[in-house]
Image (spheres, helix red, strand yellow):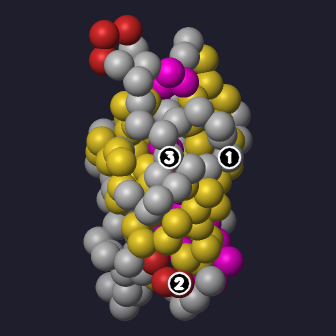
Amino acid sequence: MGGGSAGAQAPRCVTGQLKVTFRNVEGGLGHFGVAIVFTNAGDSCVIVGYPGVDGVSADGSHVVEAQRTPAGYLGGARGDPPLVTLAKGEVASALFEGFNGAVDSKGPCPPYNSLAVIAPDDTEEVAVPVPWEQPLCYPEIHPVVVGDTGGANVPG
């Protein structure tokens, strides 16, 4: 897998060259998450920072935006977001996590059936159907890291 320091020649990865998929991450105490996996389908590139992630309802409305945080209950990045170099076919990922239901006084979560994902420093989004039935409440997105676990606190 990728993960070395980026050379000065490598351009930033853009959403259009990345295949976006999910990998389930074990949760606990009401938390659930998925690693948003970016597989490079193009030329070598670098990726660093936070992807944009919104919950999108069946009618196409963006109903919730994931808060950008370095790490959360299930994991994330340790220290500054790493600069990850991806050759063709290599992967990086970011952990998307939230609660399995509303937290007492905050009320119900807006329903959404897909996530609009944007690679860091890009503007093009790709819609990916969510692999769960209930929306995650108060979602967080953590920085992109090497590999396909999103930096989860579980064995890869």
**Position of 96 relative to 75 (above/below):** below
**Which is closer to the viewer, label 1 or label 2?**
1
Quick one: label 3 or label 1, which is nearer the N terminus? 3
Q: Is residue 96 magenta?
A: yes
Q: Is mark 1 on a helix, strand or loop?
A: loop
- Residue closest to the eye, 144 or 123: 123
The residue where tag 1 is placed is 131
**Position of 25 relative to 46 (above/below):** above
Drawn side of residue 49 relative to residue 25, left or right: left
Q: Do the residues labelled 3 and 1 touch (CB within 8 Å)?
A: no
The secondary structure that most of the magenta stretch takes on is strand
Q: Is mark 3 on a helix, strand or loop?
A: loop
Amino acid type at circle 2 is Gln
Quadrant of the image occupied by residue 73: top left
Q: How crowded is mark 2: few (under 14 residues within 10 Å), some or many (20 or more)?
A: some
The residue where tag 3 is placed is 112
**Which is closer to the viewer, label 3 or label 1?**
3
The residue shown at (32%, 75%) is 122
Name the mark on residue 96.
none
Magenta span of residues:
84-101
**Position of 89 relative to 156 (above/below):** below
Quick one: label 1 or label 2, which is nearer the N terminus? 2
Alpha-carbon span between mark 1 and mark 2: 23 Å
The residue shown at (55%, 76%) is 18
- Residue closest to the eye, 129 or 97: 129
Q: Position of residue 68 (x, y in %)?
A: 29, 45
The residue where tag 2 is placed is 17
Q: Where is residue 79 in the image (x, y as percent from the top left)?
A: 32, 41
